[in-house]
Amino acid sequence: MGGMCAFPAIGFTPRCAVSPAGFPSAASTGRPPSATLQLMSDKHGPRGPGSVQPWQVLLLGGASGVGKTSVSYRLAHHYGVGLTEVDDFQIVLERITTPEQLPAVHWWRTHPEEAAALDGPGLLAHTLAYGAAVADTLDPVISNHLDPGAPLLLEGDFLLPALAARPQFAGREAGGRVAAVFLYEPDEQQILANYRAREASEPRRRAHASWDYSEWLRQECRRLGLPAVAARPWDTGLARVIAAVDSRWPAAPSSLLS
């Protein structure tokens, strides 16, 4: 559910400050339950050996605060694939690049006064610019996982639907091997409640930015024909995400691939 440490003011809370298992109970806070606590008792994992998914890379996107973390670990467990948080790539990008090379990645620190004054459309435009920079960074990573035997789940705030729709990655044909699903939260007040449950500062502006981005992602998924799944009800969220992925990219019997 977190985001990049560089954006404390626009709706992307540092994951480094929040443990993946740090969700309070849903009953007490109205927030998604702990992914780790549900992992072992999950009814939807892991998938049996009788079928094989056609994709090699699965993208799980969605705005900060909608509940991705409560799904991502269990989703990776269900499909029996590795999980990488895109936050890690963002941290590396900040360390190994300069503002001249990737201005969008460094802009929040190099232009703090301008960033603090951004309105809603400005925040969204900057978020999309950052997502485009992340997409170009992930392009060779996804290409490296297109071969059978190394499936991967990538999860993060800045994953854009257009990345999943690319026909090629680092010059290699995608060939239906990159799947994607995006979580959204239609209620801005619920995103605000989620933020308030995990931090002390007033997150109203960041919650609005996150909701605005969430709505943009939902519309973009509709335009590109990608599945977008409502985050709530949380107790059925994982099942609905799995159903959306399997419907769009149905598994084939393993006997047909031997």
Image (cartoon, grey):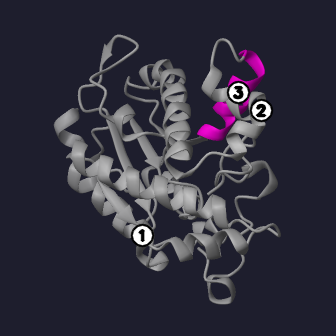
Q: Is residue 105 left or right of residue 45?
A: right
| Image quadrant assignment for residue 70 | bottom right
State whether the magenta stretch is mostly helix, strand or loop: helix
Of the pair 40 and 109, the residue shown nearer to us: 109
Q: Is residue 81 left or right of residue 12?
A: left
Q: Which secondary structure lies at badge 2?
A: helix
Q: Which residue is mark 1?
A: 186
**Lower sequence index among marks 1 and 3:** 3
Q: Is residue 257 left or right of residue 28?
A: left
Q: Which secondary structure lies at badge 3?
A: helix
Q: Which residues are magenta?
A: 86-98
Whether residue 84 appears in this view of the structure is yes
Q: Are marks 1 and 2 in contact (CB under 8 Å)?
A: no
Q: Are marks 2 and 3 in contact (CB under 8 Å)?
A: yes
Whether residue 249 appears in this view of the structure is no
Q: Which residue is mark 3?
A: 106
Q: Which residue is mark 2?
A: 109
Query: What is the C-alpha distance between the residues marked 2 and 3?
Result: 6 Å
**Lower sequence index among marks 1 and 2:** 2
